[in-house]
C-alpha cells in the first residue's frame, strides 16, 4: 500500500520518530554518565508502540526496561531477549512460575511478595532475581522504610538486584519532599549494603547528582515530555499527529458548532472539519474557563478547535488562513514540533502522559528513524 492509499484508509496519521526517542534517552543517560540508564516502556511505551520503542532503545544500548505488568514484560522479552525486564506491579498472587519462565524480575513491594518469590525459588532450587520497592512518600506501592530489616531477612533466598523508590514531585526541584524522600531511601538502603539503587524518574535526573544512584528510570521524557515544567523542554518531539481536512464550510455570526452548541461564531467564520475525534483518543473535554482552546497547525498557522470534539471529528476555525490554503485533503498538525505534548495537554485540561497513552489504534502509524 502506498503512502497516499494508507492515509486514505486510516484517516489521521501518527508518526513516531525513533531517532528522536533514542536521542532523548541518550541525552538523559549523559546527564548521569556514572549511572546506567534504563527505559520505562509501560502502557505500550506511553502509547507509541512498545515493541518498536524497545527495539530501537536496545539497539542504542539500553539494557534494562521497566513495564507495568507481566504481559507487557513478555512483549518486551520477545523483542529484547537479552534485556533485564522489571515488572512494576510486582508479583501477582500465584504468578511466580509465569514470571520466572519469562525471565521477568518483579519489583517486590510487600513482605508477602518477598516470601512468595523466595519460596518459589527454593522450590525450583535457585535464587531468583528481583527488585525491592520502598514507599518514601507516594503511598501507592512499596515497603515501609521501617520494614527494611524485616525485608532483608525475608529476602535472604532472593537474588536482590535493585532497591528502588519513586519521587512524588521531582518536577518541582525546590520542593522539600524531594530531600525527605532521598533521606528516607538512604535509611532503607542501610539494610541492603552492596545492592544497586534507583530513585530517579525523568524529572529526578535533573535534580542533581545526589539521587542518581546506580540506575535511572526515565519514561515520559524519552517520549518528548518536558521533565522540567516552567523551563524550556530539553527533549526532542517524538510523536506527530496529523489529520486530513474532510470538508470546509462557512457559517454566519450567531451560528453554533458541534454537539450542544457549545461554541457560537461571533463573526462570519470558515470552518474545517478534521477526520479524528475522541474515538481516536483525542481529548473530548477541550474547553475550559480561562483556558485557551487547543489548536492545530494549518498552512503554517495556528487555528483553534471550536465546538465539542466528536467521536470522529474535530472542527477548526480557519477564518484567518488564506482561503486557498485550506482545502479538502489538506493536512492539519495537532501534535508535533510546534504544538508539543505538554502544551496540548494544558490546553485540554489534562496531563501529557494521558495525551500520549490515549493515542488510538485507528491512526495510520508510521515509524521513522529506526
Image: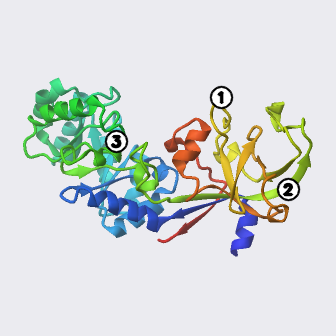
Residue underneath mark 3: 88
Which corner quadrant holds the N terminus?
bottom right
N-terminal of the pair, mark 1 or mark 3, is: 3
Total marks shown come to 3
Classify mark 1: residues with Cα within 10 Å, few (<14), some (14-19) or many (20+). few
Label 1 to label 2, Cα distance in Å? 29 Å
Q: Residue 247 bears which disc, if any?
A: 2
Instruction: Let me know if residue 17 appears in the view.
Output: yes
Between the C-alphas of marks 3 and 2, the distance is 46 Å
| Label 3: how many Cα within 10 Å (few below 14, some 14–19, many 20+) | many
**Residue plotted at (70% across, 75% down):** 2
Which x, y percent locates residue 76?
40, 57
In this image, 323 relative to 167: left or right? right
Q: Which mark is residue 211?
A: none
Query: Which residue matches tag 1?
Result: 289
Q: Earlier in the sequence, mark 3 or mark 2?
A: 3
Asked whether 90 or 300 is in front, the reply is 300
Circle nearer the viewer, 1 or 3: 1
User: What's the CA distance linking mark 1 and mark 3?
Assistant: 37 Å
Residue 74 shown left or right of residue 185 in the figure: right
Amino acid at each position: 500500500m502506498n503512502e497516499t492509499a494508507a492515509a486514505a484508509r486510516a484517516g489521521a496519521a501518527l508518526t513516531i520518530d525513533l531517532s528522536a526517542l533514542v536521542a532523548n534517552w541518550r541525552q538523559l543517560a549523559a546527564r548521569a554518565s556514572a549511572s546506567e540508564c534504563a527505559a520505562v516502556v509501560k502502557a505500550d511505551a506511553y502509547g507509541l508502540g512498545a515493541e518498536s520503542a524497545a527495539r530501537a532503545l536496545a539497539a542504542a544500548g539500553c539494557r534494562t526496561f521497566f513495564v507495568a505488568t507481566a504481559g507487557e514484560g513478555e512483549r518486551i522479552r520477545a523483542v529484547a531477549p537479552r534485556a533485564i525486564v522489571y515488572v512494576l506491579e510486582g508479583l501477582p498472587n500465584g504468578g511466580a512460575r509465569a514470571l520466572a519462565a519469562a525471565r521477568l524480575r518483579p519489583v517486590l513491594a510487600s513482605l508477602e511478595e518477598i516470601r512468595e518469590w523466595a519460596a518459589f525459588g527454593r522450590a525450583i532450587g535457585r535464587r531468583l532475581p528481583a527488585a525491592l520497592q520502598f514507599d518514601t512518600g507516594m503511598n501507592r506501592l512499596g515497603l515501609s522504610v521501617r520494614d527494611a530489616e524485616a525485608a532483608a531477612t525475608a529476602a535472604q533466598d532472593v537474588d536482590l538486584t535493585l532497591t528502588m523508590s519513586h519521587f512524588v514531585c521531582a518536577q518541582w526541584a525546590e520542593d522539600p519532599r524531594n530531600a525527605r524522600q532521598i533521606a528516607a531511601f538512604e535509611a532503607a538502603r542501610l539494610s541492603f549494603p552492596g545492592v544497586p539503587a534507583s530513585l530517579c524518574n525523568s524529572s529526578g535526573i535533573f535534580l542533581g547528582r545526589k539521587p542518581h544512584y546506580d540506575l535511572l528510570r526515565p519514561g515520559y521524557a524519552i517520549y518528548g515530555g518536558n521533565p522540567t515544567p516552567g523551563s524550556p523542554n530539553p527533549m526532542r518531539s517524538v510523536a506527530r499527529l496529523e489529520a486530513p481536512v474532510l470538508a470546509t464550510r462557512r457559517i454566519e455570526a450567531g451560528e453554533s458548532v458541534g454537539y450542544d452548541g457549545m461554541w457560537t461564531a461571533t463573526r462570519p467564520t470558515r470552518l474545517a472539519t478534521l477526520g479524528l475525534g475522541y474515538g481516536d483518543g483525542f481529548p473530548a473535554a477541550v474547553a475550559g474557563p480561562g483556558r485557551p482552546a487547543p489548536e492545530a497547525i494549518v498552512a503554517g498557522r495556528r487555528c483553534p478547535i471550536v465546538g465539542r470534539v466528536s467521536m470522529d471529528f474535530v472542527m477548526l476555525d480557519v477564518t484567518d488562513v488564506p482561503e486557498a490554503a485550506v482545502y479538502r485533503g489538506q493536512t492539519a498538525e495537532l501534535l508535533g514540533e510546534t504544538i508539543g505534548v505538554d502544551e496540548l495537554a494544558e490546553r485540554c485540561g489534562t496531563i501529557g502522559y494521558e495525551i500520549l497513552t490515549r493515542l488510538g489504534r485507528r491512526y495510520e502509524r508510521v515509524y521513522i528513524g529506526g
